[in-house]
Amino acid sequence: MEIDFSDGQITLDKELNDLDKLVIDFVNVLDKSNINYVLISGYVAILFGRSRSSEDIDVIVERMSEERFLALSVELAKSFDCIITENPKDAYDTYLSQRASIRFARKGEFVPNMEFMFPKAPDLDNWVLANRIEVILNGISLKISPIELQIPYKLFLGSSKDIEDARHLYMLFKDRLDKGLLTQFLIKLDKEGRFNKYLT
Amino acid sequence: MKLPEIDLDELEKIKEANFRERLEFQDRYVEWMKKKGNIKWSSAQKSIVNRKSD
């Protein structure tokens, strides 16, 4: 596996799968609209080679005004359908403002889709947005959650799939991780026991 | 029809053992990835990821 780490940035070239392509096209719209985002959860493991698919990709997006969201919706609608509600104002008022997610799929499709959410757990989610790391995938910039948080968070979610995701990331990155940061998140999420049981 | 006896403790142990086997497989997969070029593992991954949407 050829992967480069430098200056807090990870560079990876790979043959792109359908999930990678969906992510690249979606975050391209976010970037052009100057919207801060961070990719979290299962896609982080899939990005780095986990051999499984997914129906959705979780993306936390900075909280924004309704006016700014409506402008973003116009740009997203050129390539994507919001499959939760066709009305962007409803998406903002009924879903995003109530800590619920909305989902965007390629036009005419339903899965896979991008699960789009404002920070739901404000302290944690805003920390992730502020401390996101950059992955250069085939020359394209993606922003993902720090691996030191993703591993404990996956252990917190706790399904077999989640623990396997955590193990994949840990086995791949264990020589590169900030062990102090990893330990702090394991303690905060109360998952030291599960870490010791399944990852060591 | 006589149904089989079901030992839930035994099933839980089997479930846990199966999960441990999957985790060990995960380790072997990562070791395989690390030894291979990106084209090799990502082509294999692509066939898995794209299968559902083909």
Image (cartoon, helix red, strand yellow):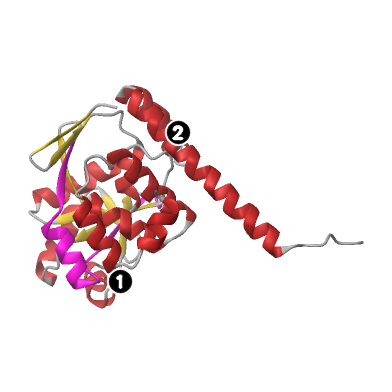
Q: Is residue A77 visible?
A: no
Q: Is residue A71 visible?
A: yes
Badge 2 element: helix
What's the amino acid at mark 1?
Ala
Q: Quick check: do tags 2 and 1 share a chain?
A: no
Q: Which residue is mark 1?
A: A100
Q: Which residue is mark 2?
A: B28
What's the amino acid at mark 2?
Arg
Badge 1 element: loop
Rendered location of residue A147, percent (x, y)? 25, 50
The label number, if any, that marks residue A200 in the structure image: none
Instruction: Please identify, in this view, whether the residue under mark 2 or under mark 1 is nearer the observer.
Output: 2
Whether residue A119 appears in magenta in the rendering, the answer is: yes
Rendered location of residue B2, percent (x, y)? 91, 62
Rendered location of residue A11, percent (x, y)? 17, 34
Quarter of the view holding residue A67 = bottom left
Quarter of the view holding residue A3 = top left
Inter-mark Cα distance, 2 to 1: 38 Å
Instruction: Return the chain for callout 1.
Output: A
| The one of B34 and A193 positioned closer to us in this rendering | A193
If the image is split into quadrants, where does the N terminus of chain A sit?
A: top left
Residue shown at 9% from the left, 53% from the top: A33
Residue shown at 33% from the left, 28% from the top: B34
* Residue range (magenta): A109-136
Vertical side of A92 occupied by A135: above or below: above
